[in-house]
Image (tube, rainbow, N blue to C red):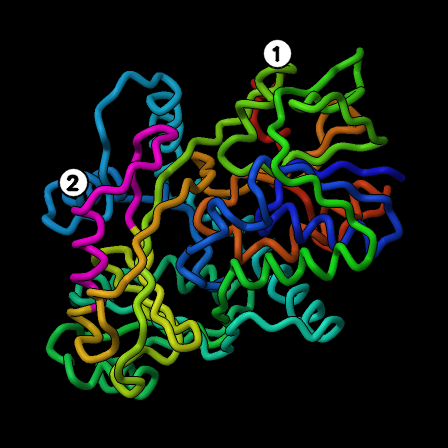
Amino acid sequence: MRVMVLGSGVIGVSCAWQLAAAGHEVTVIDRQPAPGLETSYANAGEVSPGYSAPWAGPGVPVKAVKWLLMRHRPLVIRPHVDWGMVGWVLSMLRNCTAARYDLNKSRMVRLAEYSRDCLRELREQTGIRYDERMQGTLQLFRTRQQLDGTGADVAILRRYGVRFEVLDRAGCIRQEPALAAVEDKFVGGLVLPGDETGDCFQFTQRLAALAAERGVVFRHGTPIKGLLREGMRIAGVVTETGTERADAYLVALGSYSPLLLEGIGIHIPVYPVKGYSITVPITDARGAPESTVMDETHKVAVTRLGERIRVGGTAELAGYTLKLHDARRNTLEHVVADLFPRGGDVSRAEFWCGLRPMTPDGTPIVGGTRLPNLFIATGHGTLGWTMAAGTGCVMTDLISGREPEIDMEGLTVERYRHAYR
């Protein structure tokens, strides 16, 4: 079967690799000159199935107000006329109940845990390297209230068999020895030993090269103008150089997916939530993190990637703008300097931002549509890297007409009542 994948980020490339492995003739189209140059370029570096949770949850509306008042705030809303953002926020607020949080997290963990297994299998098959580490994630709590409030998450982790351990201050230091220098900054943590880290950009580029060796055709520098629909099927992809045709089409354009799908009457509630990162060269390995430390107060992840520290976080609602704001850099620099003051040289940091494709319930949209030859893989939010390998396997099964290895309940576009017009 001829399959056209739209998008060459970590999701699109993972899907292309698996599709080619299943024997399909695969073409990938992307406007960028190479793979992984948008949201996959400099994310936080976490492969964290244990940390998979929706942003919408009990108490979040109150927390959001507090976040907006913080100097180094994890949430920023830039006022502008955007009814799409208003609708997305209202839908997110409707998901801020205990019942919805439990349901949404269970769906996310299901895909994330499967994805980690798929990534391990892919590593064994290919020998791919990407500054990977398998030393877990430490969720660091600066206050007793944060530490005492882990009950709901722990219950779900237990239900799905996700390994974890609640740590006191000394336990956190055993997990991350460099924290001994700042032990007065935190009270405890939650470690997820099954989580991994790695450079998503390296992974995407190297997997794309392997996919090309397997016969996948990459058409980079090719802007997509629209989908050509004929009745209940997609007949082609309209690009600036002409119309490309295939048997099946997979939309994996991240935050830009809803803009393309609107043109054929499919509405998905995916909104771009901007995230920032800095990449800091390590100057003292003993003062740097061993894996990932998630600062629960600032919602910032500090991750070891080879000889670099990746510091990623913040959520900015500002539409599709990629403008960099120094205040966000200041927040990232504050967190890494506060927790790992001897680790790296922030004066030499690379500052970056990307648009995370977020759904209001946190769960990605992966699966088919009412058009038999159109498939969607987007809405992964901050967990695209975590869920990429599993998404590739799931989408390949579906496109190949096979039953996926995990339950697809609640993962497809069908969970939104008004997806089709």
In percent of the image, x 17 and y 69: which residue is there? 337
Residues under labels 2 and 1: Cα distance? Answer: 36 Å
Q: Determine which quarter of the picture holds residue 223.
A: top right
Instruction: Tell me the quarter of the image containing the N terminus.
Output: top right
Secondary element at tag 1: loop
Is residue 199 visible to us here?
yes
Instruction: Tell me the quarter of the image containing the C terminus.
Output: top right
Residue 38 image point, x, y percent: 48, 44
Tag 2: amino acid: Leu
In percent of the image, x 75 and y 56: which residue is there? 211
Residue 419 image point, x, y percent: 59, 21
Disc number placed over residue 421 in the picture, else none: 1
Q: Taking 340 as reference, is 365 left or right?
A: right
In percent of the image, x 43 and y 34: which residue is there? 360
Determine if the magenta segment contains residue 328. Answer: yes
In percent of the image, x 20 and y 63: which residue is there? 335
Chain part drawn in magenta: 314-336
State which tag comes first along the sequence, 2 or 1.
Answer: 2
Determine if the magenta segment contains residue 295. Answer: no
Q: Determine which quarter of the picture holds residue 87.
A: top left
Considering depth in this image, is 261 or 241 the residue closer to the camera? Answer: 241
Is residue 410 visible to us here?
no
Residue 142 image point, x, y percent: 18, 67
Secondary element at tag 2: helix
Figure check: 3 above or below 404: above
Figure check: 339 above or below 386: below
Considering depth in this image, is 279 or 72 the residue closer to the camera? Answer: 279
Count of numbered tags: 2
* Structural crowding at the residue carrying mark 1, measured as other residues with C-alpha within 10 Å and reported as few (<14), some (14–19) or many (≥20): few
Which residue in the protein does label 2 denote? 68
Tag 1: amino acid: Arg
Residue 24 image point, x, y percent: 86, 46
